């Protein structure tokens, strides 16, 4: 498996922060850009999901009514990105609704959650990238360079996963991490341990 560095993470963050293009642009009139004679894959998937929603709300509805409603909803929701609106429609199937006019709002709520999760993921990746940049590179070819001099504040800001990597490579010691986080080092029995019975 290839190593991932801060540059790779910056690219992933950029992709997550980029606003996805709406379905109306990526599949104009519901058609595939590469093969205009065919329906676009997201438009088709959206139609399938909407048909299930219609059936859920109107089990006895006619095929004509269902088809007309699905087409109207596809036109209404084509301002959302294809992948996002398809995922949001699947999520809406699990939401309780009583009326057809609730569907648009519920799908948009689910789409907003999906977009918020992208922003959260981008923020976490940015923190990870910054933590990687803060770690000093090992000198030469030898990964085992020994502990490095970092301030306690810097060590405290490094995520646990990166601290474990630092310990495994010998760049950090458990004592440095414990001191930075104000915890007791394993094996240090001089500190009071609440669950330990007095001898």
Image (cartoon, rainbow, N blue to C red):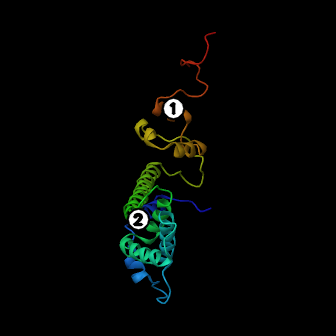
**Which of labels 1 and 2 is toward the front?**
2
Q: Which mark is residue 100?
A: 2
Asked whether residue 62 appears in the rendered view, the answer is yes
The percent coordinates of residue 57 (x first, y second) are 47, 63
Other residues around mark 1 within 10 Å, as few (<14) / some (14–19) / many (≥20) = some
Other residues around mark 2 within 10 Å, as few (<14) / some (14–19) / many (≥20) = few
Q: Quadrant of the N terminus?
A: bottom right
State the residue at coordinates (50%, 28%).
183
| In front of the other: 77 or 141 | 77
Q: Which mark is residue 150?
A: none
Q: Quadrant of the C terminus?
A: top right
Q: Residue at the top extreme?
A: 199
Q: Residue at the bottom extreme?
A: 37
Quadrant housing residue 186: top right
What's the CA distance linking mark 1 and mark 2?
Answer: 57 Å
Q: Which mark is residue 178?
A: 1
The percent coordinates of residue 115 (x first, y second) are 40, 60
189 relative to 37 in the view: left or right = right
| In front of the other: 69 or 24 | 69
124 relative to 189 in the view: left or right = left
Per the image, label 1 sits on a secondary structure element best described as helix
Number of dots carrying numbers:
2
Q: Is residue 151 above or below residue 89?
A: above
């Amino acid at each position: 498996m290839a190593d991932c560095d801060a540059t790779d993470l910056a690219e992933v963050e950029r992709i997550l922060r980029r606003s996805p293009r709406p379905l109306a642009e990526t599949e104009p009139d519901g058609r595939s850009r590469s093969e205009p004679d065919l329906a676009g894959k997201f438009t088709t998937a959206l139609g399938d999901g909407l048909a299930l929603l219609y059936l859920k709300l109107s089990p006895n509805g006619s095929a004509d009514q269902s088809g007309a409603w699905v087409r109207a909803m596809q036109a209404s929701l084509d301002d959302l990105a294809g992948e996002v609106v398809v995922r949001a429609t699947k999520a809406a199937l699990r939401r309780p609704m009583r009326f057809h006019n609730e569907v648009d709002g519920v799908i948009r709520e689910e789409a907003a959650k999906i977009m918020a999760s992208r922003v959260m993921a981008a923020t976490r990746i940015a923190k990870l990238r910054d933590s990687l940049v803060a770690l000093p590179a090992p000198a030469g070819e030898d990964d085992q360079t020994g502990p490095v001099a970092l301030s306690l504040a810097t060590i405290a800001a490094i995520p646990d996963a990166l601290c474990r990597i630092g310990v495994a490579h010998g760049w950090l010691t458990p004592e440095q991490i414990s001191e930075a986080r104000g915890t007791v080092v394993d094996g240090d029995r001089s500190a009071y341990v609440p669950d330990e019975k007095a001898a």
